[in-house]
Image: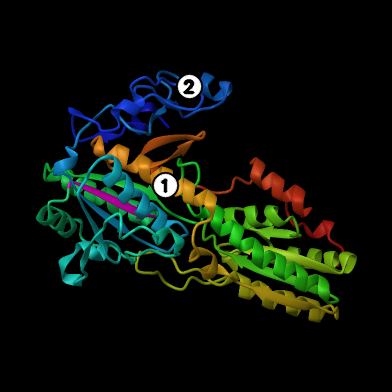
Amino acid sequence: MEAADLRVRSLGACRTESPLGALVTRRGTTEHYVDENDRVLFDDTLAMLAARDGEPPSFEPGGPRRQIYFDPAKTRVGIVTCGGLCPGLNDVIRGLVLELTSHYGVRKILGFRHGYQGLVARHGHDVVELTPDGVEYINEQGGTILGTSRGNQDPAEIVDCLDQLGVNILFVIGGDGSMRGAQRIAREIAERDRRIAVVGVPKTIDNDIPFIGHSFGFQTAFGKATESIRAAHTEAKAQPGGIGLVQLMGRHSGFIACYAALATNDADYVLIPEVPVDVDDFLPHLRRRVRDRGHALVVVAEGAGQSYLSPNGTDASGNTRLGDFGVYLRRRILDDFAAAAEEVNLKYIDPSYVIRSVPANPYDSVYCLRLAQAAVHAAMAGRTEMVVGTWRSRFVHVPIPVAVSTRNQVDPSGDLWMSVLEATGQPTTFEPSTVTS
């Protein structure tokens, strides 16, 4: 990461006095606040800083500005939600609307229905007007009042729609695929030399978008997942040879599985995509654990063990449809215990779509509101082709090219995975020589 990588695009100089300018006039950088003229360092250790040559990379801080680019009275805003459901989507929509209207005085906010399809005329989706009264209680509901969809749309048609409706700012709430779409929209706008800001609020319960601290809805998701883990643990303890097998969401990143397992501290094994597992070596270890303790609890992320499965094509967004490792592992466990003539009572639970459709918990509700506020501040100041997030507990602006450049994953050499290994007692690898069949 170089200093130039973290520079955020701007539509131009800010010459309009901000309605929130008085909030920041007397503030300076402290341990709790970063002045708009300061920067948030990318590196947070002396060793990492010492290894740098030249200017250290840093993020532009989030928050209100003293002057802004857009005149609120003349500004028209659009909001769209894309991709899969996630706790907190309605909280973000509500936060955007309330901040725009109550603090900046923006009078026209449009909601586009069913993701990027809502910005393409041939799909025929209505455009809805969003008002403070209309969003008053939506944070109490799961899902999104605007609906969503997957799949790419033509950025030229989308920008045509923004032009026709006179939209000056587009807020995109979605995952990495949605942010790549936002990047293409921003590039189309730049090619036309239009002054339209595109600002993203990144969303993924898998927590796999990098450089944003963590994604909203993640805490709610792994909190909800603990209910399934507790149920599986109770079932496993109740019967001889009991095994609870819980599969949680996490296509490429095992954060939900790791955090949910740590929250309950009952799991004997956690299997994630980032750490390959040899099922043939795992099964004897599992049998020994059941013999020694009378039961076992296994938590797997959906993307684990894909080397044992065949892909099932792609979805509308181009994502590979994964094989069902939980079902595969269930069959392998039952067959292995039967071959060894050992009793087994296995309960398999997959709560995937339950955990992403619930309302946000209080922590995520607060985080969604603060992200929405930061997104509005950035957009009104003319920032574009960026997303909001946190870095070292500071709200920052992240260029979209950086946010989609890689995937946030559990580091097998990091302290999170070390905590999982400590909590479960599972080996770092399953070696045949260490297992007694």
Residue 49 lies, in percent from the top left, at: 51, 22
Disc 1, disc 2: CB below 8 Å? Answer: no
Instruction: Assign the magenta stretch its main secondary structure.
Output: strand
* Quadrant location of the N terminus in the rendered image: top left
Residue 46 lies, in percent from the top left, at: 57, 21
Q: Is residue 103 above or below residue 181?
A: above
Front one among 182 and 25: 25
Residue 417 lies, in percent from the top left, at: 66, 47
Q: Is residue 115 above or below residue 398?
A: below
Magenta-drawn segment: 168-174
Q: Amino acid at mark 2?
A: Thr
Front one among 138 and 288: 138
Can residue 254 be seen here?
no
Q: Which residue is mark 2?
A: 30
Q: Amino acid at mark 1?
A: Leu
Q: Residue extending furthest right?
A: 292
Whether residue 362 sits left or right of residue 95 in the image: it is right
Residue at 51% across / 33% down in the picture?
A: 392
Q: Is residue 185 above or below residue 320?
A: above
Residue 280 lies, in percent from the top left, at: 73, 67
Q: What secondary structure is found at the residue carrying circle 2?
A: loop
Can residue 128 be seen here?
yes
Does the magenta run of residues contain 173? yes
Q: Earlier in the sequence, mark 1 or mark 2?
A: 2
Q: Which residue is mark 1?
A: 369
Q: What secondary structure is found at the residue carrying circle 1?
A: helix
